[in-house]
Amino acid sequence: MKLLALDSSGLVASAAIVENDVTIAEYTINYKKTHSQTLLPMLDELKRMTELDLHTIDAIAVAAGPGSFTGLRIGSATAKGLGLALNIPIIPVPTADALAYNLYGSSALICPLMDARRNQVYTGLYEFQKKDAVDAPYDMQILQKQCAVDISQIVEQINALGKETIFLGDGVAVYREKIAEMMQVKYSFAPACCNRQRAACVAALGMVLYADGVQQTAAEHAPDYLRLSQAERERAEKESL
């Protein structure tokens, strides 16, 4: 099975082509340009460098949210356009789940953090459990489904679980000091090689979800924002007056 994977949910833009258990190509950039400037040129370069025939792609795995509203819309629109043109399904991969998948096989509790502004983070809690399988030796367990909460709320939850924890994601830089103040269990921060979104991880988890029957048509797909946009919140506030 060959997947095209996209992640433009945060500061990082990432695209990858993965076939079965092999990452054929991955293009990730975390710089000043917007995703609208980078994502399609990245895809074009992947296609050119790998001599990819788009019609050989079986499905598109996309980081479906939460995350940057604009970034999610760009990734979603790109996936939908390709899905419609190629008549292939979309695999919606929860953003926090895919970020946690960067640390596949870790023995620690995993806490991805994305800065959600307004003193909140997009986050979740995950751990990998060993299983008797050669091709997939670990199973990712979701202890806390992805959510938008205050940083103190997720740290309190970790302290209650009492497990060593690894934090990763762009929210670490924003809340590093607060984490240090509040944590009561052993913790660490993931290194630069695996602390941001990667399309290859979206693809790897997408393969698992696809095997479980998780897929959508391109027409059905829509991002999962988890909360209202600023414009929607402001409109709701005005209507409540």
Image (tube, helix red, strand yellow):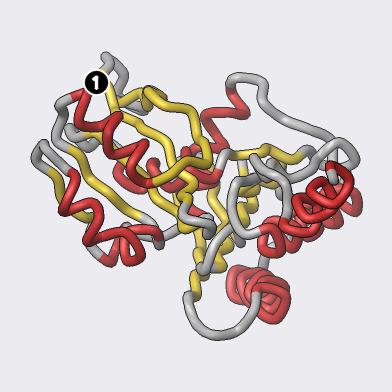
The image position of residue 22, as x and y in percent, is 45, 49
Q: From the viewer's side, name the closer residue of 89 and 70.
A: 70
Residue 89 is left or right of residue 97, and the answer is right
Task: Count how many numbered circles sit on residues in the image.
Answer: 1
Name the residue type under label 1. Answer: Lys
Relative to the observer, which residue lies in front, 130 or 119?
119
Outermost residue toward the bottom?
A: 32
Near-viewer residue (67 or 195): 67
Left of 81 or right of it: where is 95? left
- Of the pair 5 and 116, the residue shown nearer to us: 116
Q: Quadrant of the N terminus?
A: top right
Residue 55, image x, y percentages? 79, 52
Name the residue located 49 percent from the left edge and 82 percent from the top edge.
Answer: 31
For mark 1, what is the residue?
Answer: 130
Q: Is residue 199 left or right of residue 42?
A: left
Identify which residue is drawn at 60% across, 84% down: 33
56 up-or-down from 58: above or below = below
Vertical order, 119 against 157 (above or below): below
- In the picture as drawn, the residue positioned furthest to the top comes out as 132
Few, some or many C-alpha atoms within 10 Å of disc 1 (few <14, some 14-19, many ≥20)?
Answer: some
Residue 129 coordinates in the image, percent (x, y)? 27, 21
Residue at left 68%, top 37%?
91
Q: Position of residue 112 (x, y in %)?
A: 38, 46
Question: Please, which residue is most extreme toward the front here?
Answer: 241
Residue at 72% across / 73% down in the picture?
Answer: 40
User: Does 131 appear above or below 53?
Assistant: above
Q: Quadrant of residue 114?
A: bottom left
Does residue 44 lie above or below 170 as drawn?
A: below
Q: Secondary structure at mark 1?
A: strand
